[in-house]
Image (cartoon, rainbow, N blue to C red):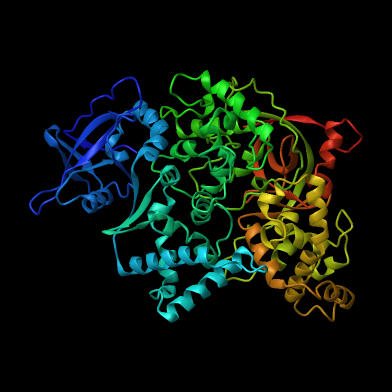
Amino acid sequence: MQMSTSSFQYSPLLPGGETFRLLLLRPWSEEESLQCSIEQFTLDEAPRYEALSYVWGDPHGLTPLRCGERGELQIRANLREALTALRHPQESRRLWVDALCINQADDDERAQQVLMMRKIYASATGVVVWLGTRTQDVENALELASNLRRFSHLVDPVPSDHRASFWELSVPRAIARAEESGEVRRSLFAISELADLFDRPWFVRIWCVQEVVASNNAMAMCGNLEVPFADVIAAAPFVLKFRSRWFTGKPLEFWNTIALQKYGNTPFSSIEGSVGTLEKILVSTRDFEATDPRDKIFAVMGIVDEGRSAVGALFPAGTVTEAQGVTALRNIFGRVVGALAPLGRRYTPKLLKVDYRKDVMEVYRDASRFMLRKPPRLSDVLCQVQHVRPPGGDSAWPSWVPDWSKPRNTSVFGGMGIFCADAEWIIQHDNGFSPQMPNRLFLDGFVDDRIVRVTDVFIVDVSEDLELEAAWSQLFDWPMIGGVSLRHNEGESLALAFFMTLLVGELGQILYDGQVKPEVAQNMSTPELRAILLQDAPRLQQDAAAFQLLRCHGSASQYPVEMSSLRRAAEEGVAEHYEQAAKANSFGRRLYLTEAGTLGLGPRVTQPGDEVVVLFGGRMPFVLRPHNGHYLFIGDSYLRWANVMWGEASERVRGGMACPFRQQTFEIR
């Protein structure tokens, strides 16, 4: 994230108060190049200014920016384009630009300014979101975005309208009628152009999230074309439906969340200014990019519960509908803790402090350890580990620490908060927040089973058919249709267990059925949620049977009994519904078979010999690999065994009741 400078030397920021720098951009004339000056102010006494939100861009091809008599700074091409477009013809314009107003060569100053960044954007009279150059396609896209926002407020959803059909049908039809009458300019033809706009680099830069969340008045700018940023972001739900993204965590889906929260009056946290817990935001922003990988953590601290208040850092996540008395108690305690922090500074837990002297692994490790220790002390953060290659070898990176600098390569099970293999509390043995061996994790739990067979990794494009015969043959020595008459461990047919495992069981109902919304499911008690899901399970099983019937080529004469049974089960099923859900949930994962004959869906690096374990505090089972007297962490898993997935097995182990499992401590490196 460092800038190379020529001649210009930064003066140290003045001590005391919240001091920062502002850039004064000089007016232009035909003969003049870009010129500016840089001055220091405190936030309380600063003159009116705007803040620039932009992408740093290609570090090559630097050009000089004259800073008065103090010399030159070297700036990148994208910033030069933005400053050129922002420069007024006759008067100076005061701006805050991170690359120029922060001494990027001073790690301590960077850390101090990062803590102020939310306030800097919130205090600005406006935030300019620089999206790049102006083209005809951009003009068409912004026209459509403006119409989408306008008519989404004018159209009332009919009782049968759910959110998908509202954006796919109701709003576009209203726009089409307005276009036909001449009320608005034609813009529906620009759907692809609007989708392309969301592919511009700004929408994947991690810092941009905080910059617009904190803003009071944001304007999107392409060349000399300006529109309210609310118009652009309000189109995210429409583009999301158009794109049919695979799984949660893609940038477009997170911007849809921001659209709902900031511009749709749908709060996602009980803490003011927060968009959720650090753990949830790290899931949602996994595919965002940062020039410095440490900023995947630091850049969101100003908009998450843990960074906004002591309440968010020390208490379990609250809900926007929790009782007033609970909220009051949380806030009173938070004010007491916050008062103990140094004057004028926000309370920040030690493990989450912005410190650019740490390397990337240390930043990610400390954040992971904090999330494991924060009440209610669950291990959901471990579900974000996604190895591309088998862990171990000479790597100094602990296998249990997620690498948030790498994009997501599969879905995250535990982040949905649906299952509860063990959802009580973690039992750790690592000497509190400052363990003597910080790269090692000591957690209690029990081994459920050992993996004996695995399939190839499932990677199926949206346009490809999901072919499962090869995967079946890697697990079993008989044809797939024969599995209709064989039994799995809880009495269901082996074939049905195979197909339901690819859906991740009940999680497939939550994500792709629409009967129970994920945010509602997370606030339900376990018995209540299970009861609802069990009622709806037959329909999902019918879809699975319909898909299997579609793939059973030439089996009618060889297996007449099984085919007859399958036809009855598939009578009302929709094969396409199953296929879409199975593709998404199994993407980047392997099916496996255990010694006891139980099916499961594990990480892409799963191999025979790995163990399926339940770690106390883990909503999902995990796959661990025995290695030289300790364990390597492989990733989260789904096991087609209700007693394990819904916590009955864990209750027996914790309670010391008779069961085939025994509690042990796992040393994970």
Residue 248 vertical position relative to residue 70 in the rendered view, above or below = below
Residue 631 lies in what quarter of the image? top right
Place of residue 113 in the rendered image (x, y in percent of width and height, measured from the top left): 37, 31
The reply to whether residue 54 is visible in this rendering is no
Give x and y (percent) for residue 653. 84, 34
Drawn side of residue 10 relative to residue 316, left or right: left
Q: Quadrant of the C terminus?
A: top right
- Measuring 63% from the left and 69% from the top, which residue is drawn there? 158
Q: Is residue 295 left or right of residue 516?
A: left
Quadrant of res 445: top right
Q: Residue furthest right?
A: 658
Is residue 337 depicted above or below 61 in this figure? above
Picture coordinates of residue 393, whole percent (x, y):
56, 37
Q: Which of the 4 image quadrants contains residue 437? A: top right
Along the viewing direction, whichever of 85 and 177 lies nearer the viewer: 177
- Identify the residue shown where x is 27% and y is 38%: 100
Q: Residue at x 89, y 57 (%)?
A: 491
Please name whichever residue, 325 or 368, is drawn nearer the observer in this view of the structure: 325
- Which quarter of the rendering shows the N terminus? top left
